[in-house]
Each structure stands twice: as structure tokens, then as C-alpha cells.
Image: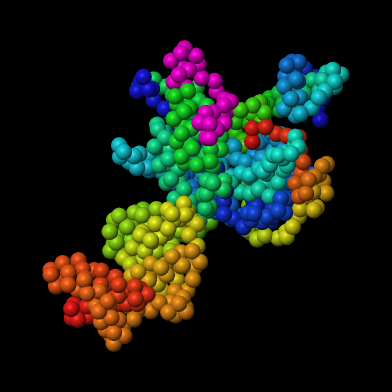
Amino acid sequence: MEQIKTGKNVISDQTIEYVGILAKLELSEEEKQAAKKDMERMLDYIDKLNELDTSQTEPMSHIFSVKNVFREDVAEHVDGGEDTLANAPERKDRAFVVPKTVDQ
Amino acid sequence: MNKEYETVIGLEVHVELATKTKIFCSCSTAFGSAPNTHTCPVCTGMPGSLPVLNKKVVEYAIAVGLATGCEINQYSKFDRKNYFYPDNPQNYQISQLYLPICHDGGIEIETQAGTKMIGIHEIHMEEDAGKLIHDDWEEVSLVDYNRSGVPLIEIVSEPDMRSAEEVIAYLDKLRMIIQYLGASDCKMQEGSMRADVNLSVRKLGSKEFGTRTEMKNIGSFKAIARAIEAEKARQIDLLESGESVVQETRRWNDEQGYSYAMRSKEDAQDYRYFPEPDLVPIEVSDQWLQKIRGRQPELRDQKYKRYVEQYGLPAYDAQILTSAKKLADLFEEAVKLCEKPKKVSNWLMGETMRLMKEHSMDPEDIAFSPVNLAKLIVLADAGTINGTVAKEVFEQVFANDIDPDQYVEQKGLKTVNDEDALRKTIAQIIEDNPKSVEDYHNGKEKAIGFLVGQTMKAMKGKANPGMVNQILKELL
Ligand SMILES: [Zn+2]
């Protein structure tokens, strides 16, 4: 892969803060700086890709040339409850327990 | 002052499809099971699990699209909508943003001002979320993923509605079409049909839209009408007092009759959609489309016409009977069995409606079979039971779907056509009621009614009323 050196893109503190909130991540100051660098390089890479003329190319929605993979509408599992709940950090009877949500 | 403003409303309607299994896994969609019974690694978002699309979902979505005049995207695909919430174990919802299965359709509604076309912007397929239950005892919520991955279609209208009345007419029509297709039962109370209302107001004559708010998941037609009236008034008040409407999601509290801005989940409305890498595109061939088109059942408007033409029903009957698929199905099945369309219609429109109202039921809740209704009609028509008894038997059919033949036999409800027995009873009644007999002879026609009543009572309601009248007059 060609090394990207342009470095045109700058991620602001505000953006990294916002992306952190969206991703539900709490980052230390060091991690924030490192993530900023990574994201800047990603955007530079996209800029590089954008240099290609794609005006004659059909948009691609999937990398494999596969389509129409379907299931028939037939039920299979009987009761997956115990297997599913085995992953619950906390459970009460047959339900997952999570911190109280509001507005539901 | 309200007259200077126009309300602009668009709806996002979510409908749970009537498939047996979920959209991307073979878990059952059955209602009423213990929490998390119908779950597997796919619908609980376990790493490494792969979704596989339920073909029936595509077919239902296309069927609804065709019935609502939509164009079908013969090349369609899924996208990921990212958000964190405990009802969504994958942290994304698989939906369709860029190439939804159907687009640019519309349905006609009846309004006081006549027929109006409401545009449908698009219909897309997506998965439902799990259910959060609040624990009454502790500061926690409980999660049940039985609904997680149940297939939904979201029908997005154009902002073409101008009043609560138009919104209800649109929802009603939509519900009817989808029920007729068998694509969903569309029960608002059970959440298989839910509506989000996008509403803004603007000065009458203005071409620009005002700032809109969204009210999510309102539970009934009546609540929707109330929410619309209240939100319209709230926005007009804001504008009149020089403030502006904030674009936000609001929750309608129907008991208290007001809405409030929602926080929490909606704090960051940045879903960062991207193409779903785990699912391949859908290509709907002309042949497949043709096959689905060929399977489209008769919809309401066609059915209504046919009831009038083929069965000779009054327009009013046809209107009521086709107003719910359940009623129409019952009607047609029963008519097939007894070949008495008007009689079937009368039982459905009369006693059935009366009992439904008495028990606050919807047509979908009717539990009796067309076979037993047809049997009852045959019994009544042949004079085997009289009208009063027929009503009694029907109540049993309605409540417990009993077999009228057996029931009438066991309870001994057959009309007594035995003339000798009847003569004896009537002679006794005449002897016991000299006053009424005298009244009758003095020209009081009404007195005979009393004597008929007494006879019926003595015969426990099973006498043939025509015969009672005839014998009474003869003996008097
Ligand atoms: Zn599953």
C-alpha cells in the first residue's frame, strides 16, 4: 500500500469528543491524541482514493458478486433462553438485568 | 387564531409482519412465551453469528408495496443503523436506507372534502428491538429479546396529511390493505402496528414547511388524534408568542394529555449508517415480481363491489362486512356453506356487532367458526328453532363456538310443531286467563299478545310462533 503523507485532515478536539460519545468510549488524553492521528490518516487515505475518477463506475454495494441468499420461513429452535441467558452479566428469572432505562 | 395555521403531518408506520420466524434467523415470532425463549446467537447479536434473510419478509414487503401503488426496487440492500440501547443487543439495527424495497406510492383516503391521495415516500424492511420491562422493586430494567429480530416494514408517508381526521383515515386504510394481504394483523394494542407522527405548522398559504417534531409509538387511533390536536396547539402557541419550535422527539402521555421532549436514547441522533456487510443484495427478477403480483388477494374495494354484484347485498352491508378482513372471511366462508348471503350478513351485522360492542372486541377477536354460524342459519331457516331460540344459540356460538346442531338437540330447543300438544297448552292458557279473553272479545287486539306470551312461556320458548297465533285465534 502506498504510504500516505499528505496530512491535510485535522480532527478537532470537539470531533474526537463527539465520536467518543457515539461509540460509548471514555478515552484518556493520550488515547484521544492517538485516535485523532489514526482518524486523520484514515481521512487522508480516503482523500487519496477520491483522486480516482469513478464517474464511469457503478456504485458497489457488496464486495462479493453474490445475491439473493434466503431462508425459508420455518421455525427451528425450541427454546434458546438458557443459552442466551448464559451470557447475561446479571439475570433475573428469564430476563437480562440492565441499569434502569428511562423514557420507555 | 388557529384558522390562520395549517398543520402538516407525515407518518412513519411500523408494521410487524406475520411471518412464522424472525427476519434473519429461524427463531419463532410467537407471542406470549417466557422472556428470551425465542432467541439465538443471531437475534441477540453474538459475535460471529451471521444473519440470513427470510424470503417471506421480502415477499410481504413487496406485496404491501404493490397494494399501495409503490415502485419496487428490483435491486435492494440492507444498511446498518448504529445506536446503543439495551433493547438492541447488536448495537445496530439492520434496516434499509439507500435502496429501500419500495418507493413512491400512495393510497387514496376518503375525507369530508372528498377523495385525497396520500403519498408513500418509501417502504423498507428492518428488524424489531427487544422489550424493556421496568422492575417495580429495584432500580433496574429487565430485557426480553423475544421481539428482537421480528420483521418489520416501515411505511414512510409524504407530509401530505393536514388533520387528525386525515391521519386516522390513512392509518385505517393502510391497516385494512395490510390485513387483507395477510401481511400483518396490525393490532395497535399489541404493538404489531405503531405510528410515529411528524408534525409541523405553518401560516396558511405558506409554501415552506415549519420546524417539525416527532412523536413516537403512540398506542391507538384515539391517542394519535389527541396527540395531534395537542401538538398542533403547542406549536401554534409557541409561534404566536414569538418563540420557535425546536426539532426534537417528543413522547405523548395519553393519560395526562401532554407531550414532553425525550432525552436519553435520542441525545445523539447520529446513526452513522453504512452498508450491511453481512447480507448480500436482493435482486427481484421480473418473474419473481410477477409471481407475487399474481398471488395478491382481492382487496377491499374489489371485494365491496363483488359483494354488491355477486351476492346482491345492500351497499351498507358490503361496506361494514368488508371493513375488516376477519368479517369478510367469516361472511364468505359461511355463505359457501349455507348459501344465504343476506342471512349471514344479518347475523354478522346484527347480533355479532352487538355482542362485540358489549364485550369491547375488535373483529379480529371473533372466535367462532363460519361452520357453526352456517349451521345456525340452516336451523333457523328451516324453522327447526324459532327466532328467540336462535338468538340464544347464537350467543353460545359467539362465546364458545358450540355446534348448534348438538346444542339444540341436547338442550331440547327444537320448535314444537306438535299441534295437539300446542292445542292442549293453549286451551289451558285460555282457561287460566279469562280477563284477557274478555278483553280480546271486546276488541282489545293487544290482549292476544299477552296470551301468545303466556303460551311461549309455558312452552319454554320453543313453540312455533306462527302456529301459536293461528291456534289461539281459532280457539278464541
Ligand atoms: Zn434468533
Closest to the observer, B111 or B381: B381
When the figure is inspected, residue B253 is found, relative to residue B430, above or below; the finding is above
When the figure is inspected, residue B3 is found, relative to residue B316, above or below; the finding is above
In x, y percent, where is residue B309?
29, 62
Please identify the quadrant where the N terminus of chain A is shown: top right
Q: Which residues are magenta?
A: B235-261
In x, y percent, where is residue B333?
42, 67
**Left or right: residue A35 compared with residue B106:** right
Name of the residue lying farthest toward the bottom: B420
Please identify the quadrant where the C terminus of chain A is shown: top right
**Left or right: residue B403 compared with residue B321:** right
> In percent of the image, x 75 and y 46: which residue is there?
A95
Closest to the observer, A98 or B91: A98
> In percent of the image, x 17 and y 69: which residue is there?
B439
> In percent of the image, x 26 and y 84: which residue is there?
B423
Q: Quadrant of residue B467?
A: bottom left
Q: Quadrant of residue B141?
A: top right
